[in-house]
Amino acid sequence: MYEIAYEIHGDESGPVIETAELTDQTSLNYRPSMISTASASTKVSVEITDVAPQG
């Protein structure tokens, strides 16, 4: 199992930091995030910041 940390960029209040878990190299478990952008033309991106083995 791996824990993947990532940042969602584009939210009005700054980056949103979340984590996901990858198990059996096939199952990705994460909680969906909601963000607010300044306008419809705001570009949203995701950056993986860390991948760490667990267990």
Image: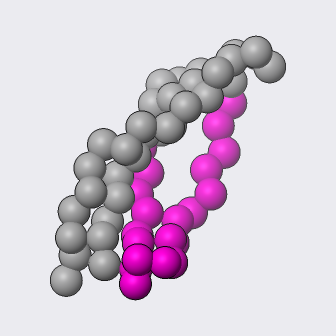
- Residue 11 seen by the camera: no
Query: Which residue is rendered at x = 52% and y = 65% of the image?
Result: 30
Query: Which residue is rendered at x = 40% and y = 57% of the image?
Result: 19
Residue 5 position in % (x across, y down):
35, 52
Q: Could you tell whether 2 is left or right of 38 in the image?
A: left
Task: Using the rendered view, name the quadrant where residue 37 is placed.
Answer: top right
**Scheme of image coloration:** one colour
- Residue 31 seen by the camera: yes
Taking 18 as reference, is 8 above or below it?
Answer: above
Taking 8 as reference, is 19 above or below it?
Answer: below
Q: Which residues are magenta?
A: 17-36
Residue 14 position in % (x across, y down):
48, 25
Residue 12 position in % (x across, y down):
59, 22
Q: Is residue 28 magenta?
A: yes
State which quarter of the image contains the N terminus.
bottom left
Query: Which residue is rendered at x = 19% and y = 83% of the image?
Result: 55
Q: In the current view of this chain or complex, which residue is farthest to the right?
A: 40
Q: Could you tell whether 31 is left or right of 25 in the image?
A: right
Residue 9 position in % (x across, y down):
51, 29
Taking 8 as reference, is 22 above or below it?
Answer: below
Q: In the current view of this chain or complex, which residue is farthest to the front?
A: 25
Q: How many marks?
A: 0
Q: Is residue 31 magenta?
A: yes
